[in-house]
Amino acid sequence: MRIIVTGGAGFIGSHLCEALAKEGHTIICLDNLGSGKIDNIKHLMKFSTFRFIKHNVIEPLQLIEGKIDQIYHLASRASPKDYQEYPVETALANSVGTDRLAKLALAKNSKLLFTSTSEAYGEPREHPQKESYWGNVNPVGIRSCYDESKRFGEALLMAYHREYNVDIKIVRIFNTYGPRMRKDDGRVIPNFIQQSLSNKPITIYGDGKQTRSFCYVEDLVEGLIKMMNSKEIGPKNLGNPNETTVIELAKLIRGLTKSKSGFLFRPLPLDDPTRRQPDISKARALLGWEPKVKLEDGLKKTIQWFKKNGAK
Ligand code: UDP
């Protein structure tokens, strides 16, 4: 197949491109290198079936000749630190960018998968979160450039589906981690690994009792591909239901790195959700997907990668 991956040079995007390349598909990777990096895809450049185009999905798409079977739309900053630094670009990548890709999907009769987010649930009043839950989002808060634009992206694609029968797929991705996360992206796992490896204080925001559920990137990519090749429209939650507090995570990473770091408690960022855990019954039943990698094993691999790539 000929497949477009937007955000293909990013953390999840590059793993997705790799998995699709191994399956023998032709890949057109679009990325503006805002948070993605050439380093993440340079090993794919040797495939004649892999093409990189530096492009921001907010801008009009240049003509892509020939058929396109599938489009994975991942392009967006996803770390709170990043998207709060570039709120307009983030809001537009998920709204204008999604519109441009929907038009392309319509013109080329391609399937289009949109990566929405667990942040669509905001500060959840239901726990764990099922797809049927509508969420509790602050529409003008500092996270709204991300969560509201992802929610709009979902709504826009449902509109394209209803009006023009575009073959769309929506997934809501929960916290994902693994090799190629940017060292400076500000998210909890890169921060804790680097702080631990350098024996610096581990920064715990709030009291550290807030929870997240972390999914290893290879598991997540398998879920994306299964969703794309299914008959489902979604939305479907993709994530690992194994819930952990931030403090437990800090202790685990400190132990795995044999670190001497202490804990430094910092104020909780505004609108930071107190808990988050996916209900993945739908993905299990309808996609035959569930994560396999245990947090400890995934963290070991991630720590190895950070060590090799000069985290210290
Ligand atoms: N967090 C923390 N210390 C850090 C970075 C993050 O305690 O150095 C917390 C953050 O407040 C949040 C959780 O870890 O409760 C996950 O944050 P992250 O930025 O990774 O992603 P989020 O799930 O909030 O989008």
Image (cartoon, grey):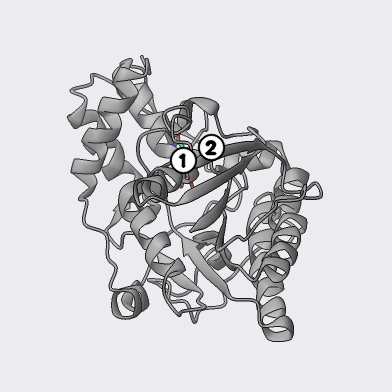
Please report the residue visible at 76 percent of the width from the left and 52 percent of the height from the top: 92
Left or right: where 87 falls relative to 235: right
Q: Nearer the viewer, residue 66 or 183?
A: 66
Q: Position of residue 290 (x, y in %)?
A: 27, 65
Q: Nearer the viewer, residue 198 or 266?
A: 198
Quarter of the rendering containing residue 113: bottom right
Q: Nearer the viewer, residue 147 or 219?
A: 219
Please report the residue visible at 31 percent of the width from the left and 27 percent of the height from the top: 305
Q: Which residue is mark 2?
A: 9
**Is the residue under label 1 in contact with that under label 2 (CB below 8 Å)?**
yes
Q: Closer to the N terminus: mark 2 or mark 1?
A: 2
Left or right: where 223 falls relative to 141: left
Going by the numbered disc 2, the residue's amino acid type is Ala
Task: Examine the rendering and report whether any part of residue 306 can be seen.
Answer: yes
Left or right: where 87 falls relative to 8: right
Left or right: where 153 falls relative to 300: right
User: Residue farthest to the right?
Assistant: 60
Residue 14 marker: 1
- As measured in the structure, the alpha-carbon distance from the residue carrying label 2 to the one carrying label 1 is 5 Å
**Element type at marker 2?**
loop
